Image: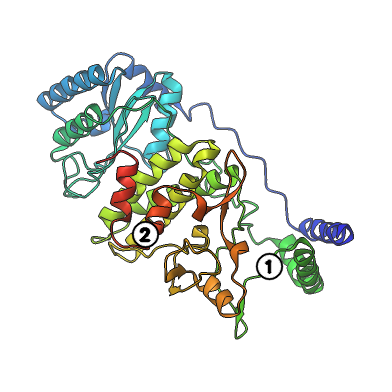
Amino acid sequence: MRRAQALLGALVLTVLTAWPAPAAAANDPPHAHDRVDRVAAALGKSPLFVDPDVSAALDESERGRIQQAVGRTGRQLGVPAYVVVIPNPNDSESQGRNEAFLFALHERSKRDGLYLMVDSRGYMDSEAFRVPRRYRYSSLDEGEPGSWKPADTERPFEGLAERITERLNAYATAPTRSPTLPTLYSTPEPFGEENRFTARDPEIQAPFLTGLFIAGPIAAPLLYWLGLGLLALLGVRRAPRDKGKVLKHNWTGTKPGMRRLRRQAARELERLRLLLATAEAEKGRAYAVSAYDAAQILYDDAKDDESRAVDLVGAIVLSRQGRVALVRDTATPPAPCLVNPLHGESTVRRHVPKVDNRLPRPCPLCAACAQLDKRGGLTVANLLRVPGPDGRRPHTAIPGVWRDEAWGAHGKKFLPRVMRYLGVD
């Protein structure tokens, strides 16, 4: 085994040297964050900032109403509230990402509180830094007061004062919770590096082509067979084949650690958040918004607590279901594979009592697990084992909402039941 690992490692190192090393990230120019500095300084004097470029967004009376609402919200929250109306183009320091601008503004101002931002398209975003409230973005549907998107994109500032006031009121009256810090899942690239290819997406250059056409034909077969041998030595099973075709399967393993679960949950939340901002779905939007709310709460609450590891799995499952709801425009995305919910959505249902008699009958399975079951290879060893303070346990052995609702296999009450579990109406 060690000889195989050493040989494979040496060969991989040799092949990878054919790829050009990425250039060092450029430092941001001195003026890069002047805009953030300017807004942070202005918020130190007044909790409402309206950029001169969008001064027509709010008239004087509307600004007065918002300032009153900001003050009232701050008093109810016990922490300051701030409102910023400002363009956020793609070539700015935050690359057009409103949440990135709010995080930069919080970092520069050094003041915790509720930060609400409206850009030149009328899109609204907010971030709560150590705000003792648990707030659901339940009004993300287009056209509703406090929604993230204006009712008419041709008139982005119509009813803006009402939308801002509604969002502030929603935070002020939300259920209390321990103050927490939100998470920025990915940061903007440094200035000048926005379009640079990374090692994960290499630009096709001469050294790459040389390695591809000369070293590639020699190295590829050797890497393939050495990889298979190493996987066999390590006891890792390949995805089953069906008539020579590899089935699509999220082979995540059966024993993920807390770091891996948190990392995957963060990725899935970010993917759903981005899709919510662009998808045109009608039937699936309500489910996707609620799934995002629940997944975000689960992610924030679980942190690194091993006793909440199964909730991180829940955040991953709900985030994926939210994306399915948007992409397919459906209010009823399928349940995940119940042998291992991290495998992704189920495609068939089978009786698998030998795997675990606590699984529903029939049990939702992904395509790969279904094929494995046909061959008699699906056993208790394939169950997802979740870390915990007393060691790993099969997810079916952990009492709670996930087992009770069988990850949504019992019908449409799954998401509402999860919301009640989280204490959200």
- The x and y percentages for residue 369 are 54, 71
| Residue that label 1 marks | 237
> Foreground residue, 114 or 41?
114
**Image quarter for residue 275?**
bottom left
> Foreground residue, 128 or 302?
302
- The x and y percentages for residue 20 are 73, 53
Name which residue lies at 49% across and 69% down: 366
Query: How has the structure been colored for display?
Result: rainbow
Q: Give the numbered dot on residue 408.
A: 2
Mark positioned earlier in the residue sequence (1 or 2) = 1
Q: Tell me: residue 287, above or below residue 233.
A: above
Disc 1 residue type (three-letter): Arg
Q: Say which of marks 1 and 2 sits in front.
A: 2
> Foreground residue, 323 or 178?
178
- The x and y percentages for residue 72 are 19, 19
Name which residue lies at 18% across and 37% down: 163
Name which residue lies at 60% across and 50% down: 256
Q: Residues within 10 Å of mark 1 (few under 14, many from 20)?
A: few
Q: Residues within 10 Å of mark 2 (few under 14, many from 20)?
A: many
The residue sitting at the bottom extreme is 243
Q: In this rendering, does residue 96 appear at all?
A: no
Q: Quadrant of the C terminus?
A: top left
- For the image shown, how many numbered marks are present on the structure? 2
Q: Quadrant of the N terminus?
A: bottom right
> Foreground residue, 106 or 351?
351
Tell me: 38 left or right of 205: left
The residue sitting at the top extreme is 45
Tell me: 67 left or right of 328: left
Secondary structure under tag 2 reads helix
Structural distance between the alpha carbons of marks 1 and 2: 28 Å
Disc 2 residue type (three-letter): Gly
